[in-house]
Each structure stands twice: as structure tokens, then as C-alpha cells.
Image: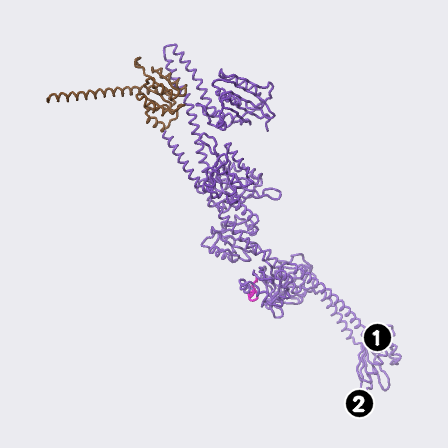
Chain colours: A brown, B purple
Amino acid sequence: MMKEEKKQRILVIDDDRVVLNGFKRALQLKGYTVDTAETGKEAIMKSKRAFYDLALIDIRLPDMEGTRLLSEMRDSVPHMVKIIVTGYPSQENAVEALNKGADAYIIKPILNTAEFLGAIKEHLRKHEEAKKYDEEKMVEYVKARAEEHEAKVSSRRSRK
Amino acid sequence: MADDIEERKRAEETRSRLAAIVESSDDAIIEKTLDGVITSWNEAAERLYGYTAEEAVGKSISILLPPDRRDELTEILERVRRGERVRHYETRRARKDGKIIDVSLTVSPIRDSTDGIMGASTIAHDITESREAEERYRMMFENMGDAVAVYQTVDEGQDFIFKGFNRVAETIEKVKREDVIDRRVTQAFPGVKEFGILEVFRRVWRTGKPEHFPAGLYKDQRIVGWRENYVYRLPSGEVVAIYQDITERRQAEEKLRLQSEITENMFEGVVLTRVGDGAIVYTNRRAEEMFGVGSGELVGKKIATTVATSTDGRSPKSVVREITAILRERGSWSGEVRTVKKDGGLFWCRVGISMLQSSQYGAVSVAVHEDITERKRVEDELRGSEAKLKDAQSLGRIGSWEFDVESSKIAWSDQTYELYERDVALGPPTVEEEAAYYSPEQAAGLHEYARRAITEGIDFRYDLEVDLPSGRHAFYSGTMRPVKNADGRVVRLFGTVQDITERKRMQDELRRYSEHLGELVSERTVELEESERKYRSLVESIPDVPWTTDQKGGTTFISHNVTRVYGYTPEEIYEAGDTVWLGRIHPDDLPHVQEAFEALFTKNQMFDVEYRIQRKDGNWIWLHDRSVSTHEKGGVRYAYGVFSDITHRKRTEEQLRATRERLEYVVASNPAVIYTAKPLADLSDFRLTYVSDRVVSMLGCEPHEMVGHPDFWELHTPPEDARRVLSQMPRLWKEGQHTFEYRFLHRDGTYRWIREEAKVVRDADGNPVEVNGYWTDVTERRRLEEALARSQQLAAIGEMAAMVGHDLRNPLQGMTSTLYVAKQMFRSPKATERREAKKLLDTLDGEIQYMDKIVSDLQDYAAPLQPKLAHTNPDELLRNTMLSMSIAKNVKVRIIGKKNVQKVELDEFLLRRVLTNLITNAVQAMPKGGKLTLETSTTDNHLAISIRDTGVGIPRENLRRLFGPFFTTKAKGQGLGLAVCRRLVEAQGGSIEVESKVGRGSTFVVKLPLKRQK
């Protein structure tokens, strides 16, 4: 399903190894390259050293709140998809998470793993598309500007 | 998520509402730290204790403790520290001004967010007033010897409905409370209008001014009696009559009055007959003796058919009718009547009858009987003797004689010869012969009479004692009369002689009789004097003062004991006339005394007054003065009366009235409902006998509903509450008092929480005879308490749910992911991948066990425990536990225990869980490895199992909270482990302790008792 050369990278951040291993196994099964971090610090360090397409962030970490990790990573790795995972669902948490740059908010336990994996895939696809769309727009804009420029230059020439 | 926010919002609102309630609460609410330092103090606390919040906050709570209650604080705080609540603790506290007040305290622990106890909140309620009120009320009820009736006014004061009726009233009126309550007074007591008190009720109801309704006779078809009433109006508008039955006092007075009446007449037997129907209403003892009847036998019988009879053949009825007519006309009758005894014997009485107006019987005749049978008999005999004398005289045994002075010759009549037993043939006797009949002195006397008759011409009459030839000694009466010739010279003497022996005998007899009569009379006189003396001493020994006055108020007789009461001696009073009586009466009282005194004479109305009079020493005293009738004697009208000193009674009444009024106000204004009740014979419950009117506003039902219907209470109390209350009855009887709390169905359909304080009254043998108590409505307090408890409970549940939720989610998450992967791999065609999938499934075991532990801990903590104790070898148990556990390899385990340790009663299953928990903790405390030492030992009383590690240790600040629920320092786990351990150990009667040093390790010791109390 996924082409070898386009293997996407995912960072899973949770203080519970049971959770980390579960996610890791499932994501690996889908062909993602998976890294794990048990603390916020470790996550920041890893995200600076390597590029990840997506991060799954537990909202409660031993050294910092997941939301704080979000805002820090928004600055350092703006182009990464960030999904908050929480066992303490509340509207405040959700709003805060989204405000701080989360792309999605998932409630633990995720009982339907297939759906979860589907959602990850969808997020990555959308992200790719958005990136692609942005690039296309840019090309179009440059093209348009260039044409505009071309037109101006030619008209000036024609007056002379 | 939306629900979650709503929940929080609600909790927040509840919290701020609670804060507002705290500040505006009527109950003092104080918060303090566990050291007793006050941290919060509301306005009600300031009102209750007198300290302002500024003064109190920061101080120790001990400023409120009276010296004798110093120890309480430590005890209360100790209980709070253990997480207990102290509810409705009744004690005393000192106010700022030093006054000691009764308070009811409810002290609850205040928990911080991690559920440690950081302080205590105290709700204090001043119960001084209700205590005192209750006490006073109880005293009032117990000591009230007077009848009390409470009325509600209806028809604009036209009538009054019974709302209360106490036991004394029930006794006096011979009715049951239930039979009068809610009835109109004019129906229950039809004579009340005539009695006159209805007017008083109306007046008191209108003006609110208490009134004394003096003694009066209440009468209807059912009941008759003297009543003295005090009438008040309660602030609630109800009219209260407090009254006494003074019938007996009245009757005693009546009797006393009759006695003085009787003395005046120098009575013997007394018979009182009702003029209307001629029925005897009273006989005294002497009369009963006279008529030969038993005590009271004649009462109710007609005078005409019992004692009266007639002398002249007329019917007793007509005699009675005749006497009655005379009595009506003249007021008195006297005469001698023949009276019949019960056995039919007749006897003579001298009877004096007078009319009298008796308050008890109406118009009566008082007949005073003097038995004159003896006198009559003597008189009869005398009459017989006189008749005989007459007969003798008529026989005419009179002789005559003549003496011729010149010739000295005597001539006798034939009768004379006969008298002198001399033969006519012998001719007249010579002087010598005649002298032989007489004694020489008598003969000389006769000679002298004759000489004087001849010389002086005088008549002589004389008696002679004659010795007759037959030897008879006779008495003769003689006369001699000179007969003169024309020139006045005595020429002859004419004489008569008469045998008077019989008459003489009669006369002697008569004399003897008269002498006997004298004796009888003197005997009688002695008797009478004696009875008079007895009566006088009786009169003088009674505290009341009998008196007699004329119409102007001048005293003609007064008992000597007047001096003791009034200061003046009888002599001073006689002398001073009315100035020492009417002249010394209080000006405010004088008009009605004068009016009543006049009415006594003019209208024959009973004189019964109470007035103030000034003693000789200037002090004022109260007198109760009464007189029933007047009598006429020698053209002057007199009143007989008696007065008594009632100063003490008046004063007591005054105090009593003031006290009663105050108490009535207290009862009426008391927010509590006061009741009294009688215990059932089997002590399973009690039945209400009185419930104060407050119950109407508190529960919407009427007192009579509660009192009248034995099931009323139970029908209005939820069955579980009723069961609980009844199950606490034995404690009430045992401890003498008890506080119940239960719900009661108000008439408006809502349940009210009632706090019932019941106290047992016992008789001399200690048996419960009555229950007194009061109810207060604690609904609002219960509501607050419940709201508080609910919010605390919700907070605790929320906290726990969050913990458990988080802890369960992680393993669950791991399992789901793993299962998904395993499923995918099972589908793989590669055998290696399928084997891999099986291995993955094995890893799930750990997660399942972990989740099971969380659930078990929760259950252990929340579910009720029923340990099954069995004799167990603790050493074996410890070793078995260790065997079932897998211990990290870097931990060295050492078990120390005696070989023959004695068996201990414990629950093996529960203790195993405790040990597993503690051992797991110990191993987890040594992540880098260490030594684990397990040891069993026994003291005299305890088995001790200690678990010692050489791990990280526990900081001092955590030690205190260690065994509380939801305390944890681990990233995972909900902190129930040690709380569960403590619970499991305590359920077996044991305890758990810990010692720890950071960096050195911890020792947990489980102690279980060796001997168990059965």
C-alpha cells in the first residue's frame, strides 16, 4: 500500500510503555517508521534531530503537560501533524489542545485500532494534499506574476 | 464533555451557595485547624460566643472551653483527625462575657484536595434556651396541681373551643381530654354561662388582661363543684384558664359554719332538713345516737316518715307541714315533740328549729333536739303523786274539836275520836290523856298555842306527830281558831285535825324527786359545759378566726386567735367597734367589702370576699372573709362568719401567676414542640398524652390528632425511620434519655426531619412512668448536611473515577493495540508471523492482571468486609505468600520466624492480600535491588508480622497520609493499596504501622490480636 521510498515517520509520546508498545506495533504493521518518547523532553529532543510527519502526544506526561509540549513543538516543527491522545477527556483539554496547534484530539482507550489507523492515514493524506495544494498555488502565483511581468515589459517595449 | 462542564459548574454554584449559607446561617459555623486554631468565624458565631471574627480568627478554639471541659477539645480533634464526624454533641461553652451556654455541636473534618484532613468545621447551635424552656415546662407540668384548660375563641368571642386540657382538669371534671378537645365549652360544660366565667373569657380575650374569677359554684347535670379560676390570654390569642377545685374546701367551710351555728343554739342532736322536699340532708352524731340510727343513715330520707310523730293523733306529715309554715313565717319554731326512734321507741325532745340558707343545700331547717325524756318521766310521776294526794284529801279525814274557855271542857267530833283511836264512850280525854298522844315538847307547844289563841285571839296552823294507841306514828295537821263573843272576848277555841301522813310521805317523796331532778340537771350542765369547752378549744386551735358582728360591723364576738393574725386582741376589737375592721380595710377593697356585707343582711347573699387589711403593727395582710347567714337575737341582727389569713396564698398566687404567665409565653414562643407521653407496658413504644400547639405550625397537624390516634405517628413516619426509632427504644429506657431523628409527613405532603429529645420520668422504683420531650424541625440542617455530604461524596467519586479511569485506560489501550496487531498477524500466510502473534497474546496476561488488581482494590476498599476467622499458622501463611510471588532478582529475601509459633485466629485470604500488597510495595521501593526481611513475632497480646525493605523510604510529610485512600507517589496506581491493607487488617481486629527513613528503607508492621474477646 505504501511505497518504500515514501515511508512516513511517526513519533509516539507516552509515559506508559504498554501504550507505547501497542501503538508502535500497530503503526509498524501499517508500514510507518515509529519512534517513541517517554517524556516531553525526550520528544522535543527527538523532533529536533529528525523529521516526523506525525506525533501522537499523551496529554499527561511525567515532566510536562501534553499541551505545553504542543506549543513548544509548534514553534520547532510547524509542519508536523500533531494528535493529542488523552485519558482525561474534557472540553477544556480539547479546546486548549486545538488552540495550541493540535490537528486532532483522540480519546484513549482507542478501541477500534483499524479506525484509528485509518484516521492517521487520512490526516497524513490531508496534510500531504495541503502541502501539495500550497505548492501548486505557489507555482500558479509565480506563474501569474511572471506572466504579468512579461506583459508589462512587452507593452513598455511596444510604446518605445 | 458538555456534561462534565455542567457538572463542574453545578459544583461551583453549590460551593458558592454553601458559602453564602455559612455566612447567613443562624447556626454558628467555625472552622479550625487540627491544632484547634480558628480559621473562619461567621456572624452567627459572633452572636453566639460574643467574639468578633477579628478577635477569634487565629486564636485557639480553647478560648470557648469552660474550665471543666478542657479535655473535650483533644478528644474531638482526635476523632476529627481519624476522619470521623462528631454529630449533635451537646456540651457547654463559655461566651466572651464568661456566661456558660448549652450548645449542640456537629464537627466535621475538612479534607484537602488529596483527601488529607486539614481541619475541622464546627456547626454550633445554642440550645440553652430550649433546654431551660424544656426544663421549666417539664417542672411546670410535673408540679402543676391545678387544672389547665386552653381555649380557642370562636364566633367573635361568643364561644370557646377546648384546645388543651390537662390531667388535673381531667380528674376534677371527670372527663377524658379527648371528650372535650375541639368541643365548645358551652357544649362540654352547659352550666358555664350561668357560672359566669364565659363573660370573663370574653373580657380577657378582648383586653388581654388576666383576671381572677373568684370561687363560684359550677353546676350542670353531670357535675357540680366549686371552682376558682385564673384566666389569661396567650400571645397566640388563646384563652387559658388555670383553676382549682375548691369544693372540698368549701364543704369544710360549710361544716365549720354549721358548727358555730350549732354552738349558738346550745344544741344536742342536729337535723338539717331541706325545706323544699322535707328530705334530711344532714344529721350529727348525737342526733344519730338519739334516733338510734347509723352514721348518715337518715340522709336523703323524709323527715315526716322517719323521726317526726305527733302527740295528738294528727299525722306526722301534718305536724311537719304546720311547723314548716310557722318557720316560713317567723323563721324559727320551738316546742316539745314526741319523736320516734328507729326501734319504735318514743322519746321526748325539746326542739328548736330555725331556717338557714345553705349554699350547698339551698333553704334548710336546722332542728336542734334536746332529749327531755327523763324530765318528762319525772314530771309524769310527779303528776301521778299529786293525783294521789288529791284523792287523800278528798277522802276528808278531818276531825274537829271545841274547847270552852270558861268551863275548860273539850268536845271531840266522831272523826276526831277515830283519828285518835279513842272510844267515843270514854268521852273527851283529860288534859293528861291528850298529852300522852304527843311528845312533851309538842304538848307544851300546843298548850302555848291555845293560851295565845285565847289571850291574843290569833289563828294557828300546825303539824303534829301523833303516837296512836295502836302504835302507829302519824302526822296530823291541825288548826285552831279563837271564837269570840259579842264583846270580843275569846270564849271558845275551834280546831280541826287532819291526817296528813300520806301527804307527808308524798311530800317527802316529792322532795326526794326534786333533789334527784337537781342532780340530773347539774349532771346535764356539766356535760354541756364540757362540750362547750371542747368546742371552744377546737375553735381556738383552728387557724381560721370565727366572728360575730352586728349589722353595723361592730364585733360582738371574735376568737382569741384573731390576735395572732391581726394583732388586736378581741377586747380591743369589741371596744373599737367597726373602726378596727372596716376602718382598716384597704381603700381599694373597702367598697366591695361593704357592698357584700350589706347584701348579706339585706339580700341574704353569701358574704365571701378577699381583701387587704392593715394589722395593728402597720403591715398589710390579705384576708379571706366569709359568712353565710344572719340571725336575729334580741331585736338585733348578727352575722356569724369566719376569716382566714391568705396573705401567703395571695403572694404565692401572685408569684405563681407571674411564673405561669412567663412559662406560658415560653411554651408558646418556643419553636420546639413539647410533648408528654406514657410508656406502653411492654416498653416497645410510648403513647403521646400531650403535644404543644406548636405542632400545628411545625407539622401541620393538630395536637389532638397526635394524642388521640395511637397510630398517627407511625402512619406519618416512613417505615424504615419508624423501625429505626422503635429499635432505639431500649436505649431510651436504659439511659433515661435519647435523641431520635426521623422524617415525618407534614400535612403539605413533604417530609420534615424531626429531631426528638426524649427524657424518661421514673417512679420511686425506677420504672418509667412518663416520657417528656420535644421535637425540633431539623429539615433545613439535614438538607444542608446532606448537600454538603453529597458534594463531598461526588467530589470523592469524581476524584476516584478520574484515577481509576486513567489507570484502566492505559492497559486497555495496550491490549487493544496488541490484539489488533495479533489479529492482523494471524491472517498472515507466514508461519513465523503467526507464531509471533501467539507470543503477542501472551503479553496481554500482565495487563489483565494489572487491571484485575485495580478492580479488586476498589472492591476491597468499597465493599463491606466480613472476615472469616480461623486458627492459622502465620509463619506458614507468610512462606506460602512468598512462594506465589515473583520477586525481582536483585532483591534478597530473608524470612525470620519461630518454628513453633502459635496459631492465630485470622482470615487467611484477607491477610494474604495484605502481605502481597506490602511485599510488592517493598520490592517496588527497591528498584536498584536490596534486602527484604520478613519476620513474625508474638508479644503477650499480639502477633506482629513485619516487612522491612532497604529501599527509597517515605518522606515524613507523606507518612501521615500514607494509609488514606487515593494517596500515591507512583505514576501509575490509584493509591488504594495501603488504604485497602489498613481496612483488611482492621477488619480482623488488628492494626498496621509504618516506620521509615528516606534513603534507608521502610518497615511495615501488621499486628493482630492473639486473644479475641467474644
**Horizontal side, residue A122 vs residue B557: left or right:** left
**Which image quarter: residue B278?**
bottom right
The disc, 1 or 2, on the residue closer to the chain's N-terminal end is 1
Residue B503's disc number: none
* Residue at numbered disc 2: B487
**Which image quarter: residue B409?**
bottom right
**Horizontal side, residue B267 vs residue B811: left or right:** right
Residue placed at 18% from the left, 20% from the top? A146
Residue A45 appears at what percent x and percent y? 36, 19
Q: Residues within 10 Å of mark 1 (few under 14, many from 20)?
A: some
Instruction: Tell me: residue B506, above or below residue B530.
Output: below
| SS under mark 2 | loop
In this orientation, which residue lies closer to the viewer: B840 or A97? A97
Give the amino acid type for the residue marked by disc 1 in the picture: Glu
Bounds of the magenta segment? B597-608
Instruction: Tell me: residue B213, above or below residue B135.
Output: below
Residue B465's disc number: 1
Magenta region includes residue B601: yes
Magenta region includes residue B179: no
Q: Chain of mark 1?
A: B
